[in-house]
Amino acid sequence: MKSLEVTLRDLREQGRKALVPYFMAGATPDWTRHVEAALVGGADAVEIGIPFSDPMMDGVVIQEAALRALEAGTTLETICAQLSQQRFSAPLIAMTYYNIFLHFGLERSAGRLAECGVQGAIVPDLTLEESEEWRRYCDLHDIATIFLVAPSTTPERFARLAAATQGFCYASARMAVTGKAQGGGDAARVVEAVRATSDVPTYVGIGITTPDQAREAALDSDGVIIGSALVQTILEGASPEQTEQFIRSFRRAIDE
Amino acid sequence: MSQHRLYMGAPSPSGHFGDFGGRFVPEALMPACLELEVAFVDAWSDPEFVQEYRSVLHDFGGRPTPITYLARLSERIGVEVFAKREDLAHTGSHKINNVIGQTLLTRRMGKHRVIAETGAGQHGVATATAAARLGLECTVYMGELDTQRQALNVFRMELLGSKVVPVTSGSRTLKDAVNEAMREWVTCVEDTHYCLGSVMGPHPFPWMVREFQSIIGHEASEQLSERGVGVPDLVVACVGGGSNAAGVFAGFANTSARLVGVEAAGGAAVSNGSPGVLHGMKSMLIQDEHGQIEEAHSISAGLDYPGIGPEHSYLAAEGRAQYVGIGDEDVLDALQLLSQLEGIIPALESAHAVAWIVQEAGRDIPRGSTVLLNLSGRGDKDVAQVREILRGRS
């Protein structure tokens, strides 16, 4: 079992719901300070977004963050260099599109991520069917490969994805790209479908924008992922202290 | 006798053409891709469906399109040029072939709405047309820059009852229109089919669109036989995503004809690109040293795309087809030349193929060769833009 999954299963055994914020690396010069602030505020793991020019699964907020990061010259290598400069008190998970890793080299990407303390990777456009080679290199470097499931996922695919995912299973609460939050979502049903086939920790993401929504999502699952809502505040100029407060408000909600 | 590989058959079960193709989409879209594959395979092997597709293209789409011998151009350049006249198909380009297939399939799948991306507007207009004919709702995503370059096509789509959504993200051109259509598809996949306009995207799109376009090549092959021309020495077509080229190549892939795809020099994915993953497929892409997709630049909105369909990448890797680039200036010259010598105003896209033939006649194309030119669309949509440029020149 990958280190990340050991950590996240321990968390669940302690009865703690996981809080996993997402940051776009390089969107602001002080982005690593926001990561640290989130950990102080009560995050259990952090997703580090690596910007891509064509983020097919992302809504306007993450698109804008990616654009800013790219304009600032952010690359996989600059991100790794910054992450290497410090140690974080919780696991880091890289999130980006497949072309970034493919272009950098799959083996080289997995190795480089591991060197700077990354323990997991989410590649939303890499389907299970196309992922064999990537998973092989991640195995060599103790990187957990995290797969998404969605409300449209079929029973047969739920079983295969839940079996393949490592660390946790990323349950999309709704049929939408990141950041959109119309309607109540299907989180409970999606999580239930994963649990029917696997005991892997299952976290809910996509469209969770308020502490209330997070509380509700956490009731049905093992944790929640907060992306666009947080990135939006940072794009609007939030300080690391404000990020800490933001995370703390979600922490309190899901601990209730 | 040596063993010859057969080209342009079905891809592998996972949708690969050699190292290219496949499916790279969010999990939310995987069930829709799988459903579409099953529906397409079922429909395409159903004689009734195929018959309906053919009869709609015949009664409504204006098929078969003729082949025109370009006598004056041929005399001028010393090469025998035959044009497959997709510019005479309904809506003015080959795009109608694909959208008739996909909208009939949409109805067969029980969906009542289509979305589409468009660059120059040709595919958008074709989709809006087919949607109107079949009574489907239709929304078209178009880069904001393209809505300005092709304002009349926006109006055409609206006239046909479709909604046009300008895309303001990224480079505001075709690539971003595809991103936005994919994002939108996630939210409405249950009742909506994404009518992709070229031989690109996740499996089964590259294969399905090629099959719906292969009517071009099969017709042309028959027509050239009937005229006693037989197999041409070359088949030449412009390539953005590559649907008209795939369609015409399909009729000649397993003959002796040389296949040449002409890309815009500012968007030459095969010549200047490298393998990568974008828009659901692995293919040749124009990208920087970090894997960020670069913006294509072309006078023609329809070729302003940094990638190419995966089967073209495969045909290039195999050496079965050759891909070349042509710059904007040569395209403008070719457009005027064809207009004045032959009375045909070609689309800027199609003018790339004309320009390459003119440039290489007597060089890469030996004198006296027979060339099949796929004239993929007519230039009416481009005349305002061309007028502006030519005015600026004088």
Image: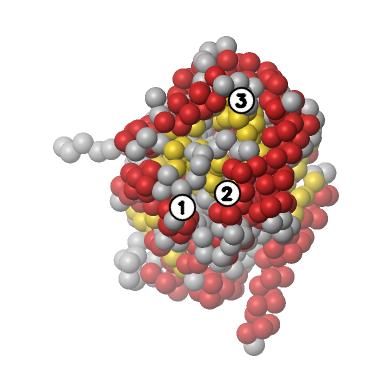
At label 1, counting other C-alpha atoms closer than 10 Å, the crowd grade (few under 14, some 14-19, many 20 or more) is few
Residues under labels 3 and 1: Cα distance? 26 Å
Q: Which mark is residue A36?
A: 2
Does B28 sit above or below residue A219?
A: below
At label 3, counting other C-alpha atoms closer than 10 Å, the crowd grade (few under 14, some 14-19, many 20 or more) is some
Q: Chain of mark 1?
A: A
Residue type at numbered disc 1: Gln
Residue type at numbered disc 2: Glu
Residue type at numbered disc 3: Arg
Q: Which mark is residue A16?
A: 3
**Counting residues from the N terminus, which is met first, the one under dot 3 or under dot 1?**
3
Rendered location of residue A189, percent (x, y): 68, 18
Rendered location of residue A188, percent (x, y): 69, 20
Q: Secondary structure at mark 1?
A: loop
Q: Chain of mark 3?
A: A
Q: Answer yes or no: do the residues labelled 1 and 2 have beta carbons within 8 Å? A: yes
Q: Is residue B360 left or right of residue B5?
A: right
Q: Which of the image's four quarters has the C terminus of chain B?
A: bottom right
Rendered location of residue B69, percent (x, y): 50, 59
